Amino acid sequence: MKQELVARNLIASDEAAAFFHAWAIDEERHTDGFIRIIELVANGSETDLRARLDARTHDFGPILEHLKDEFSLMVIIAFDEMCTCRAYAAEKPFYDALGNNTFHYWLREVIADEAVHSMNAVNVIRARYRDRIDQAATILDNLIRASDNLRYSGTFVLDYFGAVYSKELLANSRLATMRNIAKPLIA
Ligand SMILES: [Fe+2]
């Protein structure tokens, strides 16, 4: 995925490259964890799950028109990570019901990771694109409007299936992301 982003000139700065490096490692770890949980809980087979995930994740196709440059990419990722953070939080009761504390603590770490990802993306925006911060709201508004039609089509972003990804969750995540982006720099 990273190569594709570089090729499209969507990763231009060192800050964004560093972000993607750390992010990819985390998400890989999350995927491994989710696969193990699904195996344990639902008796899924790993190869089958991997094949399905590979076919699905890291496909920017349906949202490419919203990815104009590094700035819009970082805005969308900051928002997306905020959404997943909140969606996982909404799924806490499910993990708690699995009956083993390990699931509870694992999910808590995933939620924390997603919050950090969102803030890391926000920090790239604040470091490199202060002059464009007022454009972030329009990007997210367009994206959220488009997500009605995307029909959860398997991009890693906006991969929103399931009831927890409500319009309310999207709206609240937009608000939280915008608040973080617009926060005044501490002198
Ligand atoms: Fe994530």
Image: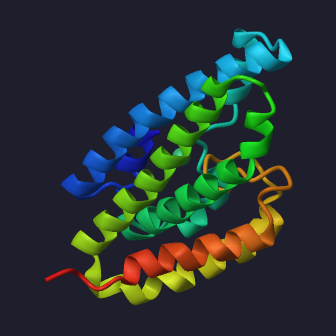
Residue 107 location, x and y as percent?
60, 37
Residue 122 location, x and y as percent?
37, 67
- Residue found at the very far bottom of the displayed protein: 134
The front one of 105 and 180 is 105
- Residue found at the very far left of the displayed protein: 187
Residue 127 placement, left or right of 21: left
Q: Is residue 72 above or below residue 9?
A: below
The front one of 40 and 93 is 93
Q: Quadrant of the C terminus?
A: bottom left
Look at 84% across and 50% down and name the residue there.
Answer: 162
Residue 169 placement, left or right of 59: right
Residue 161 location, x and y as percent?
80, 50
Q: Is residue 76 above or below residue 24?
A: below
The front one of 10 and 186 is 186
Look at 26% across and 46% down and name the residue there.
Answer: 18
Residue 98 location, x and y as percent?
79, 27
